[in-house]
Image: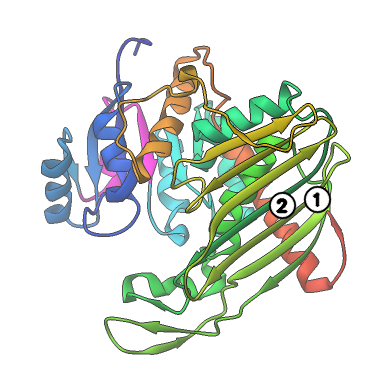
Amino acid sequence: MTSQQPIRLGLIGANIHQGWSPRAHLPALEAHSQFELAAVCTTRRESADEAKAAFNAGSAWDDYNKMLADADIDAATISLRVPSHYEPTMASLRAGKHTFTEWPLGRTTAEAIEMAEFARQQGVRTAVGVQARANPAIIHLRNLVADGFVGRVMTCHVRLMREGVLSRVSGRTWQRDVELGANTLTIACGHTIDAMCSVVGEFADVAAVVSTQATTWHETDTGKDLPVTSPDNILVSGNLQSGAVASVQVGNTAWAGSGYLMEVYGEEGTLVADSPDSPQLQDVRIRGARGGSNDLEDLTPPTELYPAPEIPDGSPYNVGQLYSQFAASIHGTASAVPAVPDFDHAVGLHRLIDAIQQSSDEGRRVTVA
């Protein structure tokens, strides 16, 4: 495979009627100039054939081990429920495929560490699906801070409030069990806090509250009310490694969530980013003021921060930009955008989330590993 040839990728978890794949991965891969959707895999041949036809894939499989044995496949994406990430990810690495696994990488940090260590042993490239980092607006914000737009960063505040916590269809109520690893702390907060850290740097320590305010969910298609142990509101404050201070609030509310806001305040200026929804899902508006001005002006990302403009808007868009980073990693080519977040990066984010949970459980400030 040369840098001019499309990367032949197989997608594990390609059911077109549910999940993240039909909303994001499949349309992103179908449109991406650097990838060929060589194969799709589900647990049933009928649904795999359906995905193959819908997104012009090269082949359809109902056994991921058989798909991964195909020497013509260069890379694999695992887009399944979090508890099902480990086995196909390890199988992909074992087969020597470059591997993209959705976030959270593992159900636990221990699983994530094992996958990251095995990937290094296998010598393959990896990516984890924290696509807010690939959002061109977030990259532009990162570059503005690095280039001194605000001077020395003093403080940063991030807020994400989404609606819909009280009811879900039965296909999504499995997330009510905190032990399965897919909840507001790991997903909404994970993506949001990772985007913040990409802009202003990592936490040195955290003090946190992790709370479950909605203790039951209504299953809309069955009429059942189900008990919930997964958290839905997270408050974090702490010191950054740079010496600045930061606070994060992520909540899943009942109605009319106010969306996303990140504010960066420095000695020489201010930057504000906002969006109707999470930065991994939506475009983000950036405004800034400096030099004594109190008027925020729009700041548009430069065109070189859009490596894959051919990707459809909406959920596929930032995923498609992340695939561009993955391609650059596989080919070893230079890029105007940051390096792809890999499995080692995912382990660091898992550890940060562990520190947040530990702080809440123990009622004290915790140093981030």
Query: Which residue is pictured at 34% across the width and 13% down the height?
Result: 1
Q: Earlier in the sequence, mark 2 or mark 1?
A: 2
Rendered location of residue 173, percent (x, y): 40, 75
Evaluate whether residue 335 shows in this view.
yes
| Label ID, residue 315 | none
Secondary structure of the residue carrying numbered label 1 = loop
CA distance for labels 2 and 1 = 6 Å
Residue density around tag 2, few if under 14, some if 14–19, many if 20 or more, within 10 Å: many
Q: Which residues are magenta?
A: 62-78
Q: Quadrant of residue 210?
A: bottom right
For the residue pair 315 and 57, the one nearer the viewer reads as 315
For the residue pair 362 and 191, the one nearer the viewer reads as 191
Q: Amino acid at mark 1?
A: Val
In the image, farthest residue toward the bottom: 224
Q: Which residue is mark 2?
A: 352
Rendered location of residue 140, percent (x, y): 58, 28
Left or right of 154? Residue 222 is: left
Whether residue 70 appears in magenta in the rendering, the answer is yes
Question: Image height check: is 329 above or below 48?
Answer: above
Query: Which residue is pictured at 58% across the width and 71% down the height?
Result: 232
Q: Amino acid at mark 2?
A: Leu
Evaluate whether residue 96 shows in this view.
no
Residue density around tag 1, few if under 14, some if 14–19, many if 20 or more, within 10 Å: some
Q: Are marks 2 and 1 in contact (CB under 8 Å)?
A: yes
Q: Quadrant of residue 139?
A: top right
Q: Which residue is mark 1?
A: 368
Left or right of 56? Residue 349 is: right
Left or right of 249? Residue 112 is: left
